[in-house]
Image (cartoon, rainbow, N blue to C red):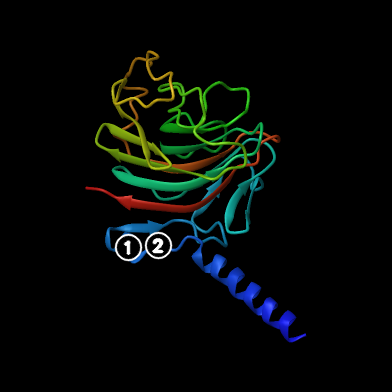
Amino acid sequence: MKRIATLLLVLGILAAAQTVAFAQLTDEMKNDGWVSIFDGKTLEGWKSNETTEGWKVEDGSIVGFGNRNHLYFMQEYQNFELKIDVKINKGGNSGVYIKSQWQDANWPTTGFEMQVNSSQSDPQKTGTLYNIIKIYKAPHGDDEWFTYHLTCRGNTLDVRVNGELLYTYVEPGRAQGAGRQGGQGDQAPAITEQNKRISQRGHIALQQHDPGSTPSFKNIFVKKLD
């Protein structure tokens, strides 16, 4: 009985440690200006479009479900870094939007979408700057956590996955230091005043793509830059 009680105590301590560990910034990150924009328990500060359903907090993660929906963090950023851990199911599709303007419905038409896709039929996989810089081989597997680290400053966007710099996108329409994934040589669309996006302020948003997709997001940290 004593051994069982001890085991339960140890399991309880481990469970508590895992809960506390979620979304906890290190002192070094705090001193460097990072803040958490998801508390691991609620959707405070976030707002979904099209429907109030489609998002839940489960095991310290924001989880999408059901029909198309986008969850916006209701603060705008211009020059910033974003770190976010993401997971997508087999055959699922999702995305992380940056610099998007609030929309009541439909896919965001401003800002940029960072694709989240390991095995869904869309050939543009994780690491893709959607329809601009295309990556055809995902740097992670199904149901496997990975980390996006995005740096937006002026007219440039650095894209890292799991610590590896894939490329630096420079508006209008160029990629520098393209990574090993392939596809970045595709011609980017012409930049006009209507679709010029990288220098604007905008929201961070998460995508629920379709009923077959179940994306998860956690450890969402932002650092404002000058």
Q: Is residue 177 above or below residue 144?
A: above
Which residue occupies the extreme left position in the image?
A: 226
Tell me where residue 223 appears, x and y as whole percent.
32, 52
Q: Which residue is mark 1?
A: 30
Query: Cα distance, mark 2 to mark 1?
Result: 6 Å
SS under mark 1: helix
**Res 28 seen here:** yes
Q: Which three-letter amino acid code belongs to the residue tagged 2?
A: Leu
Residue found at x 33% / y 46%: 81
**Residue 101 as seen in the image, left or right of residue 29:** right
Answer few, some or many: residues within 10 Å of disc 1's Cα (few below 14, many 20 plus, some between 14 and 19): few
Tell me where residue 39 appears, x and y as whole percent.
50, 61
Q: Check the picture and name the quadrant holding the N terminus.
A: bottom right
**Res 100 seen here:** no
Tell me where residue 166 appears, x and y as whole percent.
37, 31
SS under mark 2: loop
Which residue occupies the extreme right position in the image?
A: 1
Task: Indicate which disc residue 103 carries.
Answer: none
Residue found at x 30% / y 62%: 28
**Residue 151 as seen in the image, left or right of residue 213:** left
Q: Is residue 154 above or below residue 187?
A: below
Q: Which three-letter amino acid code belongs to the residue tagged 1?
A: Lys
Q: Which residue is mark 2?
A: 25
